[in-house]
Image (tube, rainbow, N blue to C red):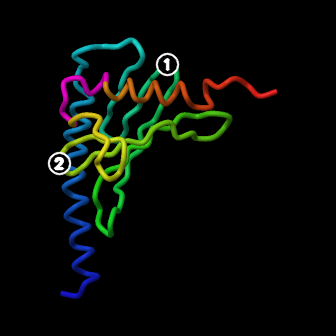
């Protein structure tokens, strides 16, 4: 088998594994939060994840990312509308082992995808990033 075909086959297998993991992750987010901080909520449907955090509507976009020539993780980009544009507030990465991290290489661990307090962990990271974003910055001038 030539190298390009082998790489494509490995990409298909990695994508399938990450898709299955994403389904489990989404199911955990769809479950009721054990501890309900008042800073936000999750609305999970079969094809999207929407979040309300600090009175902002945020979409969670996902895509597979390549690291060292291999599909290695799912990137979750949390975006909100700001001044007629989509503004990326936070990126988290779901690693093949089920760990949610702040970096694509898996070194800054946030929590496991099935952590009891996953809602709180994500909302806490999201609210911190949101408060440090242009959305809450003072107007210039």
Q: Which residue is drawn at 42% across and 42% down?
A: 91
- Residue lying at the far front in this picture: please name it: 107
**107 or 5, which lies in front?**
107
- Residue lying at the far right in this picture: please name it: 141
Left or right, 63 with respect to 23, comes to right
The image shows residue 121 at horizontal and vertical percentages of: 31, 26
Q: Which residue is drawn at 52% across and 40% down?
A: 88
- Relative to 41, does residue 97 appear above or below in the rendering? below
Name which quarter of the figure residue 67 lies in.
Answer: bottom left
**What label sits on residue 124 in the rendered view?**
none
- Relative to 127, does residue 74 appear above or below in the rendering? below
- Packing grade of label 2 (10 A; few <14, some 14-19, many >=20) is few
The image shows residue 79 at horizontal and vertical percentages of: 50, 38
Name which quarter of the figure residue 34 lies in.
Answer: top left
In reply to whether residue 55 is colored magenta, the answer given is: no
From which residue to which does the magenta span run? 113-120
Residue under label 2, please give it.
97
Examine the residues drawn in magenta and state their main secondary structure. loop
């Amino acid at each position: 088998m030539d190298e390009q075909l082998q790489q494509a086959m490995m990409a298909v297998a990695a994508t399938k594994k990450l898709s299955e993991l994403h389904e489990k992750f989404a199911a955990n987010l769809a479950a009721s939060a054990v501890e309900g901080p008042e800073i936000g909520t999750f609305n999970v449907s079969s094809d999207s994840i929407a979040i309300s955090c600090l009175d902002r509507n945020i979409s969670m976009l996902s895509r597979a990312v390549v690291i060292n020539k291999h599909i290695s993780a799912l990137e979750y980009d949390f975006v909100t509308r700001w001044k007629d544009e989509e503004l990326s507030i936070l990126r988290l990465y779901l690693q093949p082992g089920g760990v949610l991290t702040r970096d694509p290489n898996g070194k800054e661990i946030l929590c496991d995808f099935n952590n009891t307090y996953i809602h709180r962990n994500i909302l806490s990271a999201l609210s911190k990033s949101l408060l440090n974003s242009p959305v809450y910055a003072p107007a210039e001038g």
